[in-house]
Image: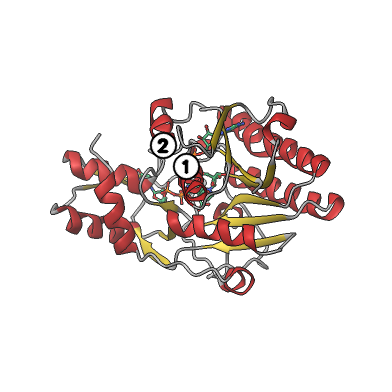
Amino acid sequence: MKGALVTGCAGFIGSHLSERLLEMGREVVGVDCFDGFYPRRVKEENLSGCLGHPGFRFLEADLCRADMDEVLEGVEVIFHQAAQPGVRSSWGEQFDRYVRNNVLATQRLLEAAARRGVGRFIFASSSSVYGDCPRLPADEGALPGPISPYGVTKLAAEHLCMLYARSHGVPVVALRYFTVYGPRQRPDMAFSRFIRAIRAGREVVIYGDGRQTRDFTYVDDVVEANLLSMERGLSGEVLNIGGGSRISLLEAVEIMGGMMGATPAVRHEEGQRGDARDTWADISRARRRLGYRPTTTIEQGLRKMVAAVGAG
Ligand code: NAD
Ligand code: UGA
């Protein structure tokens, strides 16, 4: 059986996806450069379930510089998860990292995929391409309007994907994930911070009034959407991948407190530039095209995450 490439395999979503592919008996080539957005030791820990597996080949490499023929050797399906994530940190001096890892790296991978030919190219896009969508739930026909530099780079990468699908026949599917959570969630993200704060008896810091909502999506559902995209013969498609669990931050903190037997102290700080007020995915297209249905409720997902996240 030909292999799968998972870029960003040491990250939050990439590590879950790699493990699942290995469980299914796929050969996996994992690429990651351990960029410094969060500590290398956290990423090495993420990878621990894959390293040593006979079906796993790890390449520590930067997609902007790697020998793409080596990366794509024996690869049939590409799951392109590598990126510089983080909405609020994408302003100012940091922007060059976003352009490099989100736009340039994606173009390089698409170019190599076009040259060598691949069976499927699945791109991790983002709800951040919508910005403050005037009509919710947002469907894929809505005009994108990112309000963060991060969102601009994810939209640029998504456009590149569709361009290579049209002009070079690369069979691309772009999945717009909506705020993903679960064990190993990135340390900069809200749920991971909130759980660690509650466990350590510190204040939970909420940006703004806490009534902003997110369509939180459990990581296993995102992995499932990727697998469905591999199996279906789609190309040139953009699909929303939401979790069907739209709640406010205050509601989420209350649920976490209940699960952890604590009454969290909340400190409100100023709302952050680049944050959408609300997100809500219309997933009817993903349901039709992929048969995608999220199966993990926010209570089930948070319970698993609370069990996995330590203090700190
Ligand atoms: P993450 O930071 O945990 O994982 C990304 C990995 O990519 C990191 O380990 C990093 O070292 C690697 N990487 C970055 N640039 C690279 C390069 N040039 N070469 C090789 N490796 C590189 O992030 P995540 O939360 O797992 O996100 C995965 C993908 O999903 C990203 O594309 C992100 O934009 C997208 N996404 C995430 C969410 C979410 O809620 N986590 C939501 C929407 C979209
Ligand atoms: C997340 C990911 O971080 C992005 O990479 C991804 O592209 C995006 O989802 C997406 O859906 O496309 P975000 O929704 O900002 O971005 O996710 P969190 O970092 O978990 O933040 C959720 C909300 O909590 C935001 O309103 C944020 O301002 C707030 N927050 C975050 C806090 O109030 N306190 C914190 O300590 C952290």
Q: Which residue is mark 2?
A: 46
In this picture, residue 127 sits left or right of residue 173 = left
**Under 8 Å from ligand 1: the CB of mark 2?**
yes
In this picture, residue 3 sits left or right of residue 24 = right
Front residue of this view, candidates 42 and 212: 42
Quadrant (top left/top right/bottom left/bottom right) for the C terminus: top left
Q: Determine the residue positioned at 34% across, 55% down.
A: 209
Q: Determine the residue positioned at 64% across, 38% down.
A: 102
The x and y percentages for residue 296 are: 38, 64
**Under 8 Å from ligand 1: the CB of mark 1?**
yes
Describe the element under mark 1 as helix, strand or loop: helix
Q: Determine the residue positioned at 45% across, 47% down.
A: 16
Labels 1 & 2 near each other (Cβ < 8 A): yes
Image quadrant where residue 269 sits: top left
Disc with the residue nearer the chain's start (1 vs 2):
1
Q: Would you say residue 82 is visible in this rendering?
A: no
C-alpha distance separating marks 1 and 2? 6 Å
Front residue of this view, candidates 11 and 231: 231
The x and y percentages for residue 151 are: 60, 47
Q: Would you say residue 100 is visible in this rendering?
A: yes
Q: Determine the residue positioned at 44% across, 56% down.
A: 220
The amino acid at mark 2 is: Asn
The amino acid at mark 1 is: Ser
Q: Which residue is mark 1?
A: 15
Question: Dot 1: within a 10 Å radius of its alpha carbon, few (fewer than 14), some, or many (20 or more) residues?
Answer: many
Front residue of this view, candidates 163 and 4: 4
